[in-house]
Image (cartoon, rainbow, N blue to C red):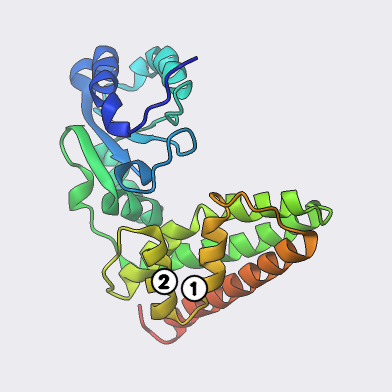
Amino acid sequence: MSKIPKTPQEIFPEIIADYKKIFGADLVSIVLYGSGTGGDYLPGKSDINFLMILSQNAGPSLDRALETVKKWRQRLVAIPLFMTKPFILSSVDSYPIEFFNMQSNHTVVFGADILNDLVFDPGHLRLQLERELKGKILHLQTGFLETDGKPKRIRQLIEVSFKAFLAFFKAMLFLKNKTIPEDRYQVIETTAKAFSIDAGIFLQCAALREDSKPYSSEEISKIFHLYLQEIHKLSDIIDRMMEDHEI
């Protein structure tokens, strides 16, 4: 069995060696991003996410990474994102939430810090938030009907959908010019205060992943409906930011 890293940092030397062997001088940077950079990393549960920044000449070499990617997936390292600097710079307006969260929560493992100098247009962030929140509403409504009311499936639906919300909340705090806390529970509480939403239900959803407590159908359905209600409220708030010329 492949050894699961206790911390992402312990695999840095091997990751660098593996990808330098594949890409050589075309490897510009290796960046760790996500929960692995802070206190939210849970060995055996959390993915370890890397961004590999390559030169524009590296495309034909990508097939050589297949075996290395497979090797690291067996140790719960997610498939890396492979990008070039021009691709990143031209994509900030299309995926501002993703790149903003990478910038806010990253560690340079090797090479240059390409993310540090990215600049984000609040209007682009607001527009993506609107799109993502409305998409979540539709996904949750459809997903709930597919659960057949089974508590385990409702719980899984909440857990999977909630993974995106910490990224949404950080982007929302940026729009309000608020300091973004490092602790995920504090992120939820700070966002709830800034946008007048119920922190309690989001904190409960965040804890489901680590909570082994069984929930009855009635209990988990109540959590789901309160969760969906607050997402509707968030969607309305983001819409009004445009109407009220806050962005």
In the displayed structure, 2 sits above or below 146; it is above
Mark 2: give few (<14), some (14-19) or many (20+) Cα within 10 Å. Answer: some
Given residues 89 and 13, the one toward you in this image is 13
Q: At x 39% / y 42%, what residue is drawn?
A: 41
Residue 26 in sight here: yes
- Which residue shows up at 29% across the image and 14% down it? 22
- Residue 80 appears left or right of 226: left
Q: Secondary structure at mark 2?
A: helix
Q: Is residue 21 left or right of residue 192?
A: left
Closest to the observer, 150 or 245: 150
Residue drawn at the location 43% of the way across and 16% of the way down: 71
Residue of label 1: 199
Across and down, in percent, residue 187 comes to 38, 65
19 is higher (above) or lower (below) than 221: above
Question: In the rendered structure, which amino acid carries the disc numbered 1?
Answer: Ala
Whether label 1 touches label 2, CB < 8 Å: yes
Residue, disc 2: 189
Q: Position of residue 11 (x, y in %)?
A: 30, 25
> Would you say residue 92 is visible in this rendering?
no
Check disc 2 and give the amino acid type. Answer: Glu
Q: Is residue 24 above or below residue 199?
A: above
Per the image, label 1 sits on a secondary structure element best described as helix
Please report whichever mark, 1 or 2, sits nearer to the chain's N-terminal start. Answer: 2
Query: Residue reaching furthest front?
Result: 213
Return the x and y of residue 63 as percentages of the image width and height. Answer: 42, 15
Q: Is residue 36 above or below residue 11?
A: below
